[in-house]
Image (tube, rainbow, N blue to C red):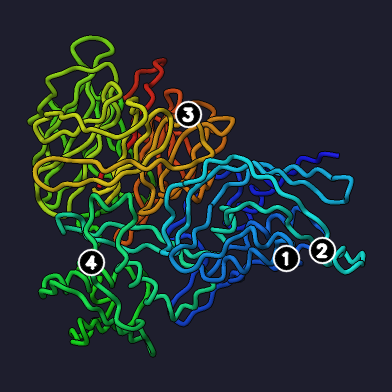
């Protein structure tokens, strides 16, 4: 009597749709942070505590969902909540851990199979994808476990009392020896938070993803954020950012009342510049929290800061501007014209705007245009990188000395100052950095495969996403000195396979193309924990994808990403094919001649 459950294949999808308000097949953009909206003194519409053991009654699938949610919440009670689901005789199998030792194995449930046994117990076998380890400090680290299946038993709790009351629910027999948490429960019982650390050269703030249990009261939010900052950045970010000085400690708990917050730190090397940077770091790490902040260093008060007033002159992305859409038409870059959106002129001189395959044009802090383009080489099927920088129009173009058989769309690493432009491009399966003279230098990567096919840079210029061997990675960039080094890449778990294209859609989200039985585009969190299908009916392999990353400076445009598949370009939200009549400044097409398709669309900002 084996019964495969739709909990993994269908039930989880239904839960995701219900939790997000996003249909399975749609073209959707979600702005801001995920999760329910909260604020100082506000409330959270989601329930903060996971269901109890008996909440599912006699429904085995509901019981399993609840069991995979039980560990959610404040770490110190995680084992207590999970043990409530375990049969009394098996509780000793779970060895309690406390504080920083508590770690939850976050999994994506694929399938659950129930087998009824002759003794009225049920054997449950679940198939999972390991996503990561949720630590007590709110970070989701890469997975440690390699298991793809877990098996355990169920028995009716009513048997203990000699009754047949189905409301008594079930107990887990022979439980897994780790704490499991489903990705659905992570989304439901945790609030996503973004804190910030200064880049290694202290020129800008770099986002770091964290999770705060919804059960933690809002008045403790400041204390949690300060503890995270004191504890340092996530492991994968460490090579490219700096934490607070060694041995920094929080003196007592951060306190607050009437929108005034007090933080007292024991911090060494506390020169005024470092303190000012810490105040800015705190202001942005506290997100949308309003009110006043009083920072004390060893009980010595700094001037009280209004959080909003502190953020306004200290923008996260000081050179972010409203994006303009461009694309390639007959080998030249042209503006794309959509109602209600800004449409500019091509910042290239005509002699530089030829033989182009794909491009990335960026605006530097000093108002120069940074142009990087893949152009046709000297023979068919060969490509070169072409680079030029100047106040528009760019007319002088340098070309790489080597031609390649394949080359990805180049990307600029955006900086907060006026330093020389540096970018990244993939050529013949190798990642390269390039400079304003189109000189290309190999970038070593510690990956199991050398077959790199795509690279994308975040708006902060300090984080990149990579596709290598059809898998998704993120890594931090270190821009110290004149070069570019990439920290150890972190692989992200995803339901997609055979990935082909990636770009950054938000501070903490990637837009990724691959296969989900058919070609699809998903939005995936920077740690791989949250997936949202954006399009599941692409129909052909996506060979080009570009997005404008939502940020706190510029409002997202009506179409957040554009892509090309099977020689046809599309934009999202509203979804539509980019027809030739959207291309500006092209010669009329003679009657009877079929116009070319626009290709390789991108955003200029």
Q: Earlier in the sequence, mark 2 or mark 1?
A: 1
Q: Earlier in the sequence, mark 1 or mark 4?
A: 1
Q: Earlier in the sequence, mark 4 or mark 2?
A: 2
Label 3 Cα neighbours within 10 Å, binned few <14 / some 14-19 / many ≥20 = some
Closer to us: mark 4 or mark 2?
2
Tag shown at residue 157: 2
Q: CA distance from mark 4 to mark 2?
A: 50 Å
Between 311 and 144, which is closer to the camera in this rendering?
144
Residue 603 appears in the rendering: no
Asked if the residue under mark 4 is in contact with the one under mark 1, i.e. CB atoms within 8 Å, the reply is no
- Which quadrant would the N terminus be assigned to in this image? top right
Q: Is residue 156 above or below residue 280?
A: above
Label 1 Cα neighbours within 10 Å, binned few <14 / some 14-19 / many ≥20 = many
Q: Secondary structure at mark 4?
A: loop
Q: CA distance from mark 2 to mark 1?
A: 10 Å
Kindly identify which residue carries mark 3. Answer: 498
Label 2 Cα neighbours within 10 Å, binned few <14 / some 14-19 / many ≥20 = many
Choose top left, top right, bottom left or bottom right for residue 510: top left
Q: Report the side of 479 relative to 110 (left or right).
A: left
Q: CA distance from mark 2 to mark 3?
A: 45 Å
Q: CA distance from mark 4 to mark 3?
A: 40 Å
Kindly identify which residue carries mark 1. Answer: 53
Closer to us: mark 2 or mark 1?
2
Asked if the residue under mark 3 is in contact with the one under mark 4, i.e. CB atoms within 8 Å, the reply is no
Between 99 and 561, which is closer to the camera in this rendering?
99
Tag shown at residue 244: 4
Closer to us: mark 4 or mark 3?
4
Asked if the residue under mark 3 is in contact with the one under mark 2, i.e. CB atoms within 8 Å, the reply is no
């Amino acid at each position: 009597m084996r019964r495969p459950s739709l909990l993994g294949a269908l039930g989880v999808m239904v839960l995701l749709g219900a939790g997000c308000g996003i249909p399975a097949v749609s073209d959707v953009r979600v702005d801001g942070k995920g999760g329910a909206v909260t604020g100082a003194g506000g409330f959270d519409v989601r329930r903060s505590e996971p269901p109890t053991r008996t909440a599912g009654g006699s429904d085995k699938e509901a019981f399993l969902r609840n069991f995979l949610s039980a560990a959610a919440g404040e770490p110190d009670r995680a084992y207590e909540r999970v043990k409530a689901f375990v049969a009394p005789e098996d509780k000793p199998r779970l060895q309690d851990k406390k504080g920083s030792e508590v770690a939850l194995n976050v999994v994506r449930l694929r399938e659950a199979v129930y087998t009824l046994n002759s003794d009225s117990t049920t054997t449950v076998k679940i198939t999972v994808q390991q996503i990561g380890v949720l630590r007590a400090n709110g970070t989701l680290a890469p997975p440690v476990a390699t298991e793809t299946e877990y098996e355990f038993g169920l028995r009716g709790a009513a048997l203990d009392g000699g009754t047949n009351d189905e409301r008594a629910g079930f107990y887990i027999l022979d439980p897994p020896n780790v704490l499991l948490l489903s990705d659905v429960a992570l989304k439901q019982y945790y609030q996503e938070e973004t804190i910030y650390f200064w880049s290694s050269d202290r020129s800008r703030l770099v986002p770091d993803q964290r999770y705060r249990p919804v059960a933690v009261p809002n008045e403790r939010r400041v204390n949690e954020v300060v503890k995270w900052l004191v504890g340092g950045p996530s492991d994968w970010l460490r090579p490219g950012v700096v934490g607070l000085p060694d041995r920094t400690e929080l003196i007592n708990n951060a306190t607050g009342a009437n929108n005034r917050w007090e933080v007292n730190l024991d911090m060494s090397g506390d020169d005024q510049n470092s303190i000012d940077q810490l105040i800015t770091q705190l202001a942005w790490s506290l997100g949308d929290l309003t009110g006043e902040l009083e920072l004390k260093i060893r009980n010595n008060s700094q001037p009280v800061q209004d959080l909003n007033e502190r953020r306004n002159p200290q923008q996260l992305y000081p050179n972010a501007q409203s994006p303009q859409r461009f694309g390639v038409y007959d080998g030249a870059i042209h503006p794309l014209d959509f109602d209600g959106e800004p449409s500019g002129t091509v910042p290239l001189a005509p002699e530089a705007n030829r033989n182009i395959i794909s491009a990335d044009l960026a605006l530097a802090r000093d108002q120069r245009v940074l142009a990087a383009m893949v152009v046709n080489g000297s023979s068919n099927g060969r490509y070169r990188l072409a680079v030029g920088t100047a106040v528009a129009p760019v007319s002088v173009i340098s070309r790489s000395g080597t031609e390649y058989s394949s080359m990805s769309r180049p990307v600029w690493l955006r900086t907060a100052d006026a330093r020389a432009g540096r970018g990244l491009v993939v050529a013949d399966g190798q990642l390269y950095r390039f400079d304003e003279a189109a000189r290309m230098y190999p970038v070593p990567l510690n990956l199991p495969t050398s077959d790199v096919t795509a690279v994308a840079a975040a708006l902060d210029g300090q984080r990149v996403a990579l596709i290598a061997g059809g898998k998704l990675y993120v890594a931090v960039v270190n821009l110290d000195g004149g070069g570019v080094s990439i920290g150890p890449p972190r692989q992200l778990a995803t339901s997609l396979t055979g990935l082909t294209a990636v770009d950054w859609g938000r501070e903490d989200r990637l837009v990724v193309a691959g296969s989900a039985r058919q070609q699809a585009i998903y939005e995936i969190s920077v740690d791989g924990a949250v997936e949202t299908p954006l399009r599941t009916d692409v129909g052909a392999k996506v060979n080009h994808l570009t997005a404008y990353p939502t940020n706190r400076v510029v409002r997202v445009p009506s179409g957040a990403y554009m892509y090309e598949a099977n020689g046809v370009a599309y934009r999202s939200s509203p979804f539509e094919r980019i027809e030739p009549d959207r291309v500006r400044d092209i010669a009329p097409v003679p009657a009877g001649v079929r116009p070319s398709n626009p290709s390789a669309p991108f955003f200029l900002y």
